[in-house]
Amino acid sequence: AKEKSLTTYPSLVGKMTDKDYPWVTLITAVMTVIFLGAYCAAQLVAGAKIGVQLFDWDFTYFVFGGAAVLVAYCWSGGIRASIWTDAVQAFIIIFSLIVLIVAAVLHIGGIGAIINEVRNFPPEMVNPFQLDFLWVSIGWIVFGITVLGQPHLMVRHMCARTNKDIDRALKIYLAWRMTVLFLACVSGILARIIIPDAGTFDPELSIPQLWQDLLPPVLVGLLIAGLFSATMSSADSMLLSASSALTQHVIPAFRNSYMLARLGTVLVITIVIAISLFAQKGVLALVIIAWGGLASSVGPLMVVQLLGGKPSQKLAVTMMVVGFATAVIWRYGLGWHTTLMELVPGFCAGLLVFGVARVFKKIKPTQQAA
């Protein structure tokens, strides 16, 4: 029989070696719709907050405007357009950070002045040898590992023609990611120096505030255009993955109709708008919640599968449920997410379920033989 092609990330997760696990596929699809919807909302919130900061317009206008542009963008483009625009936005992000850093360094008075200012920072901000730094480091390491559970990123690997393309993309991505993270950290330090007494100021708006304070209006306009395009480029990847999960797996009646597939996109963007209007404050918190939901449910299963593990469908579902439930309890029941991100215990709990199942599987035949 001809093997069915894997066209979506949930179908990949539900395809354990030579077996199809429909419940795993369905759960992954539902998680994708919910949490990539939240992740997409974070992009709209980020763009809307910046728009409010720079233009003093109503937050709701930016959300609905961004959603309309996003739907039009997805209908006219698709995954190929998303990948190409992501590549362009990568250069725009690096360029904007470099421009900001150069302007900020000149404004402060050079590297020496910056070093002197950093020495006056509170010790808890600059001392790496502290327990809080350890928990943060562990959280972000697991954050990186659980990229395996992020549909909008993993679908790019599914589009690769050969393994050599994946290896080349990995090198390019790591070089870009390390560069951007370094520049972003430097930007944060400079923002702390220039805006020392923020008070009730939202730290997520520090970069656009610095643009206004340090750069000429023409350059600010160019950087704003780049930033908005970057948020749209990220959001469209998430919207495409979420809508494909909805129309291909959650509501399979939409699968074979082009118009119904578009209706699925509208349903997802409606969810995104609702989340955006409800969670207007913390972009980073929204990102961590969205990433953590997929990381704790799908992440452990993907790691086990890639390491050669072959869980049954029952065990796979148990791993997903326990991992996700642990993350929810950690954040909303215990409130410990302020110390350690909930995706860490959620991810570990999923792996622990598989480990315990393997141990009992090995012990059981021995007991029977005795």
Image (cartoon, helix red, strand yellow):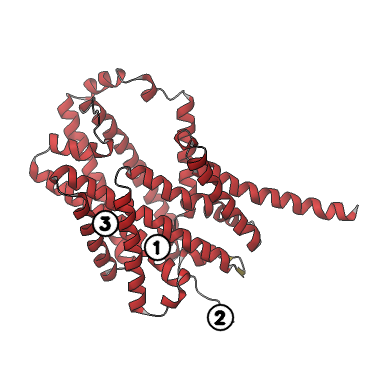
Q: Give the secondary structure at mark 1.
A: helix
**Cα–Cα gap, marks 1 and 2:** 27 Å
Position of 320 relative to 186 (above/below): below
Residue 234 in sight here: yes
Please give the count of numbered marks on the rendered protein. Answer: 3
**Residue at label 3?**
232
Is residue 189 left or right of 256 when viewed as pictured? left
**Cα–Cα gap, marks 2 and 3:** 38 Å
Disc 1 marks which amino acid?
A: Ala
Q: Is residue 306 or residue 358 the one in the foreground?
A: 358
**Residue at label 1?**
242
Say which residue appears at 50% left-offset and 61% top-offset: 28
Q: Is residue 252 or residue 72 the one in the foreground?
A: 252
Disc 3 marks which amino acid?
A: Met
Disc 2 marks which amino acid?
A: Lys
x%, y% of residue 2?
56, 80
Q: Earlier in the sequence, mark 2 or mark 3?
A: 2
